[in-house]
């Protein structure tokens, strides 16, 4: 494969995803087709009589936090430093721009060190999206399965795979410890770090597929809103 194909695909995919996500979030349409909701939005928080209408608050919250995680993600950094800044574009290629290298020690790239906080907030967002998936299997009080329920479920599984295979999470869980038996809950932390270590090598794969699954889930909910008749089963 020619060296320029991967960076070219990266530029096209990232620009395309960013443009679509920005349009969707600010299109002025709440992307909801009972019982589905786009992952760029969120349905009401809570069940039963406890429902909190926080849609206006959650739209930027749900969209900006995961975006912050992706922008500061170690995997994405590798990809866009190569593709956008040609720093360098690929192995054995020259650097695109030569200058004094300060790494991530100066503004704005020093902000990339906030990655672990973006991760913790994204875990909260993932819980919200998980609640939306549970609600996608309930229609007017009945257990329900539609193609959209499955689409939303797969999307959250892929997003969770991306979030929980994060390098920072592995470190927070116990990867940074020198001695597990010297700390509280050392055994549990060792097991957790071990599980995350097994997930982590797939981080790049999850980064790509979850990016597409978010966009495709949003498109699917828009199709149902527009009248698409999907296969459904209601108990
Ligand atoms: S989300 Fe990619 S390294 Fe943390």
Image (cartoon, rainbow, N blue to C red):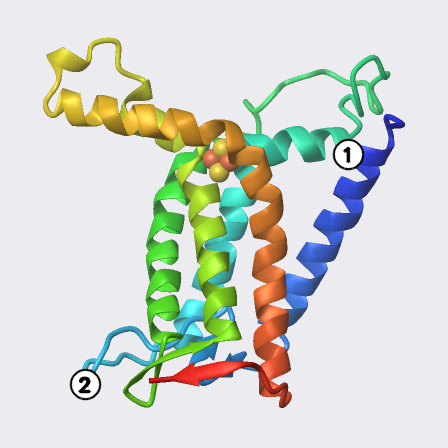
Task: Identify the image quadrant of residue 5.
Answer: top right
Visible in this render: residue 111? no
* Alpha carbon separation for disc pair 1 and 2: 49 Å
Residue ID at (62%, 44%): 208
How far across and how far down the image is residue 104, in percent?
57, 24
Question: Secondary structure under badge 1?
Answer: helix
Residue ID at (62%, 90%): 227
Tag 1 residue: 83
- Mark 2, other Cα within 10 Å: few <14 / some 14–19 / many ≥20: few
The one of 157 and 114 positioned closer to us in this rendering: 157
| Quadrant of the image containing the N terminus | top right
The one of 129 and 114 positioned closer to us in this rendering: 129
Mark 1 or mark 2, whichever is nearer to me: 2
Q: Is 109 placed left or right of 153 in the picture?
A: right
| Quadrant of the image containing the C terminus | bottom left
Q: Is 110 placed left or right of 173 in the picture?
A: right
Tag 2 residue: 49
**Of label 1 and label 2, which has the lower sequence position?**
2
Q: Is 189 placed left or right of 135 in the picture?
A: left
How far across and how far down the image is residue 146, in percent?
47, 77
Residue ID at (57%, 66%): 217
- Mark 1, other Cα within 10 Å: few <14 / some 14–19 / many ≥20: many
How far across and how far down the image is residue 134, in percent?
33, 69
Above or below 234: residue 149: above
Visible in this render: residue 86? yes
């Amino acid at each position: 494969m020619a060296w320029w194909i991967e960076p070219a695909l990266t530029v096209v995919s990232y620009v395309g995803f960013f443009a679509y996500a920005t349009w969707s979030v600010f299109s002025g349409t709440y992307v909801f087709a009972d019982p589905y909701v786009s992952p760029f939005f969120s349905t009401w928080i809570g069940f039963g009589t406890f429902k909190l209408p926080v849609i206006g608050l959650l739209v930027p919250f749900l969209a900006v936090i995961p975006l912050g995680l992706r922008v500061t993600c170690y995997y994405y950094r590798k990809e866009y430093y190569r593709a956008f800044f040609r720093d360098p574009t690929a192995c054995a290629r020259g650097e695109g721009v030569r200058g004094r290298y300060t790494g991530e020690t100066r503004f704005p790239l020093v902000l990339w060190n906030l990655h672990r906080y973006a991760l913790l907030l994204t875990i909260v967002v993932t819980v919200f999206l998980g609640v939306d998936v549970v609600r996608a299997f309930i229609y007017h009080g009945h257990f329900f399965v539609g193609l959209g329920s499955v689409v939303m479920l797969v999307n959250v599984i892929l997003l969770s795979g991306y979030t929980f295979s994060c390098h920072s999470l592995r470190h927070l869980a116990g990867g940074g410890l020198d001695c597990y038996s010297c700390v509280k809950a050392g055994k549990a932390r060792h097991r957790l770090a071990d599980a995350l270590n097994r997930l982590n090598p797939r981080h790049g794969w999850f980064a790509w597929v979850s990016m597409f699954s978010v966009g495709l889930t949003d498109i699917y909910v828009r199709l149902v809103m527009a009248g698409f008749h999907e296969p459904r089963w209601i108990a």
